[in-house]
Amino acid sequence: MIALHRDCLRNVYHKTKSVISMNPFHHFSYYSAFSSYLNPFTINFKPKQSPFGFTQTHPSYIISPSAISDQFYCISFSLFYSSRAPSRSFRRRNNKRLKASRKPVLDQSKFEKAVSQLPPRFTAEELCNVMILEEDPLVCWELFNWVAQQPRFRHDVSTYHITIKKLGVAKMYEEMDVVVNQVLAIRSFGSELLYNTIIYFFTEARKLTRAVNIFKHMRNNRKLDCRPSIRTYNILFTAMLSRGRDSYINHMYMETIRCLFRQMVNDGIEPDIFSLNSMIKGYVLSLHVNDALRVFHQMGVVYKCLPNAYSYDYLIYGLCAQGRTNNAGQLCNEMKKNGFIPSGKSYNSLVNAFALAGEIEEAVHYLREMIEMRKSADLITYRTILDEICRRGRVEEARGLLKELQDKDLVDGHTYRKLLYAMEDDFGE
């Protein structure tokens, strides 16, 4: 699209007063910025070359002003583009407008149908049953507000809970926040299940600070059945462990997880296997493998629950990441002795760690064991073990291993050629 002349906008501005009584596009008759689909006042638009080098519209194809005097029209300046990227504030405002325009609209017929299902003097239990069967969260939200205005009716824990659950599943977090504020305004109100649901959806909305504030409200609640339970702590552990993959970020959140775990134990809540595995995983991701081993060895001794497959997998991954291959191998043997099968991630970690440590035989052993257990290795694992074999001058052995992997249909043709060409480029024929 050809850009308009610098004086074009000035001409448009000075002639806006007379634009109603004449063709509004006559100012642009010598410019090619307006095509036939942009100008509603042209019929069978045919461009004509002017002697000044601009494309103009033939006057015979312009509709007379009297024919278009009753039509609504406007001149859009969206044709003028800028080479500069939009600012962050503009993108934020634009996204907010786009989000507001995408908000669902209430289906009035569904709302009236839901209201008609309520008896004349309905109770909170009857309202809860109607809202459970209603699939539209916007109807539930409108119904929640409508019944609050009815005389002799008060919401109870069940109606608050089902409303928060419906809005949270639909990701209508602004509306859910309004309902949560109503719950918090009532003293000594709620239940453990209600507050756990609120915390869960706040963590799903990445509002971790808000979730922690709800947790503090639970601890200060006078009702004993509203106090945090092991489920509450597990929700918070999961949310904090999923905040990022960077070890520094995991280290920062691990301090909070450690304080929460200590607080849970001091309150007399017995940790379960999920919370202990969360501690092991958090220590591993924050590179505190010795602390993870300490928690692991306390399982079955200090705490009642025994390690499961996830406990071993997290530790094997952490030990291999630090190059502690002997400890990782011993833990893998103990895991298999206890009847657990290492995951594909554990096998990949073992093969990579042993190969990088120069223990090629052990790496090949775990690779063959991985194949027997029908666990899939990734491209990095294959590349690592083949490169380490070639670095020790055993190129033919590496080629034989790659051919064996292809014969067993463990690598496809594309992966085989990629690995083979990489060996030839790095280590020659």
Image (cartoon, grey):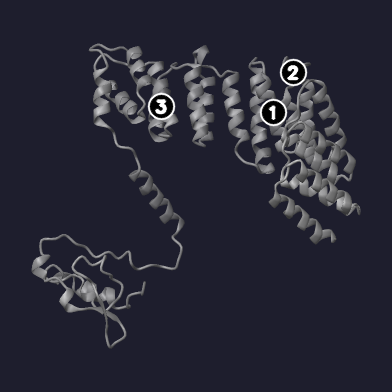
Q: Amino acid at mark 1?
A: Met
**Residue ID for mark 1:** 279
Of the image marks 2 and 3, the number of the one nearer the N terminus? 3
Residue 138: numbered disc: none
Residue at the outermost left position = 66
Q: CA distance from mark 2 to mark 3?
A: 37 Å
Q: Is residue 155 visible?
A: no
Quadrant location, the C terminus? bottom right
For numbered disc 2, what is the local secondary structure? loop
Of the image marks 3 and 1, the number of the one nearer the N terminus? 3
149 vs 81, left or right, is left
Indicate the position of residue 281 as horizontal and vertical percent values. 70, 32
Q: How many marks?
A: 3
Q: Amino acid at mark 3?
A: Lys
* Cβ atoms at labels 1 and 2 below 8 Å apart: no
**Residue ID for mark 3:** 166
Indicate the position of residue 277 as horizontal and vertical percent values. 69, 26
Of the image marks 1 and 2, the number of the one nearer the N terminus? 1
Q: Nearer the viewer, mark 1 or mark 2?
A: 2
Q: CA distance from mark 3 to mark 1?
A: 31 Å
Q: Amino acid at mark 2?
A: Leu
Q: CA distance from mark 1 to mark 2?
A: 14 Å
Q: Quadrant of residue 171?
A: top left
* Cβ atoms at labels 3 and 1 below 8 Å apart: no
Q: Compared with residue 353, is residue 189 higher up or lower down, i.e. above or below? A: above
For numbered disc 1, what is the local secondary structure? helix
Residue 306: numbered disc: 2
